[in-house]
Amino acid sequence: MKKVMYYTFSLSVILFSTFATGCSGNDDDILEEGSGETVVEGPSIDDVLTLPSEPSFLGDSIQFTKTFSLAEYSIKEVKVSTTQNGHISVLGGYKGQSGVYIYAKIDDNRGKVSDEQIKNILDKYYIVESYASGTEIVATVKENTAVTREADFRNLRITVQVFTPRNVSTTLQIARGSIIAKNVHGNQHTATSTSGTIKYIDSSGKNFTLTSDAGHIGLINTPATGSIHAKMAKGTIQIALPKDTKATLSLESSTRVNAHILNKSNFQGVNTRTKVEGTLNGGGYELKAINDLGVINLSWYDGRGGNY
């Protein structure tokens, strides 16, 4: 395995534990609202971060590591997709290197196999791509449909972790699982999941489009200059905004919209049990959320990783 630079910044253990819980442990559960994942303070613009290589972080299920010099590649966009269940995380704030770590575990109940067998299954039945090209990082893991399944075939749960510069756009897609992006500030952000969690934390951009059939969508301290569109068929949408946010709100749910922060001094428009439509702090970027069956929660971001 290719070794990368040790992470010497003192906050690393806390930061990486947040994103590594689904990778090296034995519990790759799908993150849902209230699952207890901790949102911690991210790196500042002045912090110098290097990529992790400690065994405690890498774990026993890592299959590939790729690193890219940011002196050679001016990364502006990250594209990650997998047809498998699992996890995708993107953490911004890196200046010297960018990296892609890919983990694989068995995702069925047919008994345990060795790490070597998992590697063989991945090589035989799946297509794995991880590369930098121009201003993009691309990571893809999908089943190779041109290969006939034999007795040794197993479904794999995939985790992809990407460490990037701060100013990157993101295009992220997973079957069932979690997508977590933190401290990314590019123009365009798109995330799609069939079921699970999609969260953007301490991020910003021009446009966000987040879509999930079921689970949880979270936008925590993540404003836009153009628009935010969040759509869910069943689950919870959580939006925690800085108090000075200027936005034009369109929130609609067949179950309930909780928007207790809105009052006559900061909001003009309609605020009912199932619909909020109007301007916040005079209006600004478009913030639109639709939940066909579930709750939309609108709150203030408290500056400490929470909301109220």
Image (cartoon, rainbow, N blue to C red):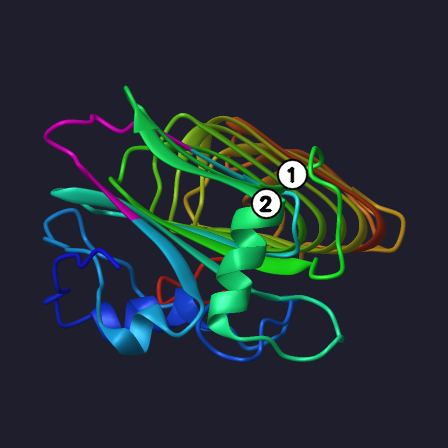
Check residue 144 in the rendering and tell me which mark sits there, or answer none: 1
Front residue of this view, candidates 308 and 239: 239
Type of amino acid at the residue the image marks with label 2: Tyr
Measured in 3D between alpha carbons, the distance from the residue under mark 2 to the one under mark 1, in whole angstroms, is 5 Å
Coordinates of residue 267 in the picture (x, y in percent): 61, 41
- Which residue is pictured at 22% across the width and 63% down the height? 52
Say if 212 sits above or below 32 in the image.
above
> In which quarter of the view is residue 290 placed?
top right
Coordinates of residue 185 in the picture (x, y in percent): 34, 36
* Residue 69 on the magenta segment: yes
Mark 2 neighbour class, 10 Å CA radius: few under 14, some 14 to 19, many 20 or more: many
Chain part drawn in magenta:
66-78
The mark nearer the N terminus, 2 or 1, is 2
The number of numbered discs placed on residues in the rendered structure image is 2
- Which residue is pictured at 63% across the width and 59% down the height? 156
What residue is shown with label 2?
Answer: 126
Please give left or right for residue 107 compared with residue 90 in the image.
right
- Which residue is pictured at 10% across the width and 30% down the height? 71
Q: Secondary structure at mark 1?
A: loop
